[in-house]
Image: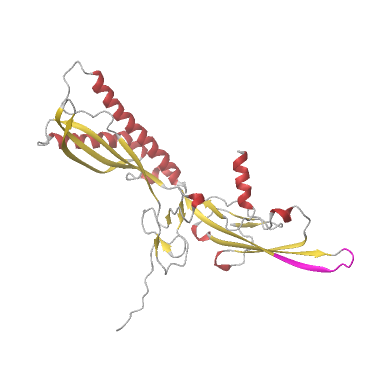
Amino acid sequence: AMRAWVLLSAVLWCLPGEKIYVKLHQNSPVLICMDFKLAKKEVVDPTYLWIGPNEKTLTGNNRINITKTGQLMVKDFLEPLSGLYTCTLSYKTVKAETQEEKTVKKRYDFMVFAYREPDYSYQMAVRFTTKSCIGRYNDMLFRVLKKILDNLVSDLSCHVIEPSYKCHSVEIPEHGLIHELFIAFQVNPFAPGWKGACNGSADCEDITNHNIVQARDRMEEFFRSQAYIFHHNFNKTLPAMHFVDHSFQVVRLDSCRPGFGKNEGLHSNCASCCVVCSPGTFSPDVDVTCQTCISVLIYGAKSCPTSNQQYED
């Protein structure tokens, strides 16, 4: 916890080029209009002027809290609140002998970005043996398996999407040629009616991500139990179609909501976050990156406005 506190306090004191990431609908950290060295001295007649995104002078309101000592905090952070926050500190130095006053000005810049957690889904693959690549049994197994998996995770508002299979003949050392179904599918936490699981919470990705991880664990357990059944029924005749042990594979796929994207180069301190798309970029769908669009002037753009001017030859 100590290290986290040190990191946090480092963000608050303005470090040149420091980027600050605030989770959507959370409060920003407190931004301090002073540097570490100055804070250790006495400061005479300080005044603080905060300028926010769009070069608006900031005054305290129900969303923005500015203290008498020039500390700023933004409550319930949203996409359009992203951008450059600048504070100008003016204070006086007074020569004791002559009472001569001199005004000193210092400027502190903070780049603040809204972000959200990515939405997780899982790509999965399994294999089943089959008697032949021809016939309707393969299709039946495929449909039954999809139904079983859907039922397994339906209470978590998760469902199986884009299922597909192909039949291949596989030559296995010391076993000769056998036929196998290669089955692939995705699982995501957006089954019809999924918003009901959010309980009106603004940060629903925390809930959907928790659900999809549980769904993944249940499916892993299901396929593990298939392998177990197979291994412990060896005295009976083997079913022609059974799960191929150790064939279960899973990969997590991240996606970002419209207006957000990942950019490890630009946001190395928040590389796994879905950060609000900056001006000049947009993201219309759940793609994981923001695309370029020079006509975008806002943070969090979901579309690329085209010029309405008609050019005549």
Picture coordinates of residue 82 (x, y %)?
A: 52, 59
Residue ranking furthest to the left: 135
Residue ranking furthest to the bottom: 313
What residue do we see at 37% from left, 59% from top? Answer: 284
Q: Nearer the viewer, residue 2 or 80?
A: 2
Residue ranking furthest to the right: 97
Determine the image quadrant of residue 147: top left
Residue 128 is a magenta residue:
no
Q: Is residue 57 left or right of residue 166?
A: right
What residue do we see at 24% from left, 23% from top? Answer: 230
Q: Height in image: 123 above or below 248?
A: below
Coloring applied to the structure: secondary structure
Q: Is residue 28 left or right of residue 179?
A: right
Boundaries of the magenta span: 96-105
Q: Please identify the quadrant where the C terminus is shown.
A: bottom left
Determine the image quadrant of residue 99: bottom right
Picture coordinates of residue 235 (x, y %)?
A: 19, 15
Q: Nearer the viewer, residue 76 or 95?
A: 95
Picture coordinates of residue 28 (x, y %)?
A: 57, 52
Q: Height in image: 140 above or below 51?
A: above
Picture coordinates of residue 55 (x, y %)?
A: 57, 68
The number of callouts visible is 0
